C-alpha cells in the first residue's frame, strides 16, 4: 500500500490481473486519480490472476488493494467456476458467434456492486473497469449499454446518488482494439509482464484458450513482444 495523496481524488479500479484492467487503472492514474484497487477471489479456476492483480496494483502505486472472497462455484454455470471444459484453439470468428461458456453469470454486476459500495464509503465519484466490447469476448456485461444502465441504477440506489454525487462508471477501453489497449498501456508504463490472461493458470500461458489467442493477436497487431512469452 502506498501513502495516500490527499490532493488526488480517489477512484475505485477493478483489477483482475489481466492486461485490460491494468491499462484501465493506469489511465485512472494518468488522469490524476488515487487508485483504490479491488480484486475478487470468487472461486475461479486458478489463483495466478490474483497474484498478478497484487503485482499490478503494487506497480501502479495503489493507495489500497482489497481482495474480496466469495464462492461462485456454489452454482457454477461457467467454465471458470465449474468442471465445464475451457474452449481451445478457436478462431475469432468462432468466438464472435455466441456467448462463450467462460461467461460467468452476472459477474460484472456483482463486481461493480462491490466497487460501488466501496466508492461510496471513500466518497469516490469514479469507478474504472477494463471492459472491452471489441475483443470478441461476447460477454453481455462488457457492453457500454450495460455500463450506462448500471450507472443509472447506482444514481437511484445510493445515498451519494440521491444527494447529487453520483458515481460515474469509467470504461476507457470499451471501444478500443486489443492492440490499441496494449499500445496505450505501453505508453503509460504498464508492465505487461506482471499481467496474466490465460484461463487455465499454470506456469506459462496455454496459448490455446480464447483469452490467450486474443492477447497474442493484440501483441502481434501492436507489433510488440509479449513479455510473458519471452524465453
Image (cartoon, rainbow, N blue to C red):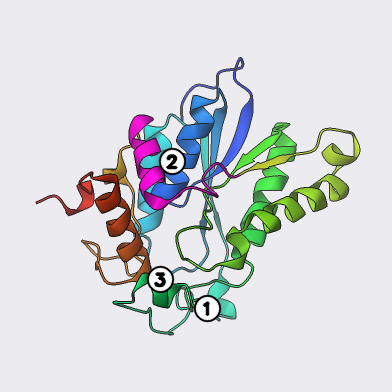
Read off the residue under disc 1. Answer: 98
Give left or right: position of 140 versus 199: right
* 10 Å crowding of disc 1: few (<14), some (14-19), many (20+): few
Q: Which residue is mark 3?
A: 45
Say above or below: 89 vs 204. below
Badge 3 crowding class, 10 Å Cα cut-off, few under 14, some 14 to 19, many 20 or more, is: some
Residue 5 lies, in percent from the top left, at 55, 18
In the image, residue 213 lies at what x, y percent? 31, 65
Quick one: SS at disc 2? helix
Looking at the image, can residue 126 be seen?
yes
Give the labeled residue for mark 2. Answer: 23
Discs 2, 1 touching: Cβ within 8 Å: no
Q: Residue at x 37, y 33 (%)?
A: 59
- Going 49% across and 33% down the picture, which residue do you hit? 27
Q: Which residues are magenta?
A: 171-188
Residue 15 pos. (x, y %): 49, 47
Q: CA distance from mark 2 to mark 3?
A: 23 Å
Q: Residue 191: where, in percent of width, then height?
A: 30, 38
Q: Of callouts 2 and 3, which one flags the residue occurring earlier in the amino acid sequence?
A: 2
Q: CA distance from mark 2 to mark 1?
A: 26 Å
Determine the residue located farthest toward the right in the rendered image: 162
* Marks 1 and 3, the one that precedes in the sequence: 3
- Looking at the image, which is closer to me, 227 or 5? 227
The residue at the far left in this view is 231
Res. 18 in view:
no
Amino acid at each position: 500500500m502506498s501513502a495516500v495523496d490527499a490532493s488526488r481524488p480517489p477512484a475505485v479500479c477493478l483489477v483482475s490481473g489481466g492486461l485490460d484492467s491494468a491499462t484501465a487503472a493506469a489511465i485512472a492514474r494518468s488522469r490524476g486519480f488515487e487508485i483504490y484497487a479491488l480484486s475478487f477471489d470468487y472461486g475461479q479456476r486458478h489463483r495466478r490472476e490474483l497474484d498478478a492483480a497484487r503485482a499490478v496494483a503494487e506497480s501502479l502505486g495503489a493507495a489500497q488493494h482489497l481482495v474480496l472472497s466469495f464462492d461462485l462455484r456454489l452454482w457454477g454455470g461457467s467454465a471458470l467456476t465449474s468442471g465445464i471444459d475451457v474452449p481451445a484453439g478457436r478462431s475469432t470468428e468462432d468466438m464472435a458467434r455466441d456467448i462463450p461458456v467462460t461467461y460467468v453469470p452476472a459477474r460484472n454486476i456483482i463486481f461493480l456492486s462491490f466497487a460501488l459500495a466501496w466508492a461510496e464509503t471513500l466518497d469516490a465519484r469514479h469507478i474504472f473497469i477494463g471492459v472491452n466490447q471489441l475483443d470478441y469476448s461476447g460477454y453481455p456485461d462488457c457492453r457500454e449499454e450495460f455500463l450506462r444502465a448500471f450507472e443509472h441504477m447506482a444514481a437511484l440506489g445510493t445515498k451519494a446518488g440521491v444527494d447529487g454525487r453520483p458515481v460515474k462508471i469509467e470504461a476507457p477501453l470499451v471501444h478500443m482494439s486489443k492492440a490499441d489497449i496494449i499500445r496505450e498501456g505501453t505508453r503509460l508504463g504498464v508492465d505487461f509482464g506482471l499481467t496474466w490472461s490465460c484461463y487455465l493458470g499454470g506456469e506459462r500461458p496455454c496459448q490455446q484458450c480464447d483469452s490467450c489467442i486474443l492477447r497474442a493477436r493484440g501483441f502481434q497487431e501492436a507489433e510488440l513482444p509479449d513479455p510473458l512469452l519471452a524465453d
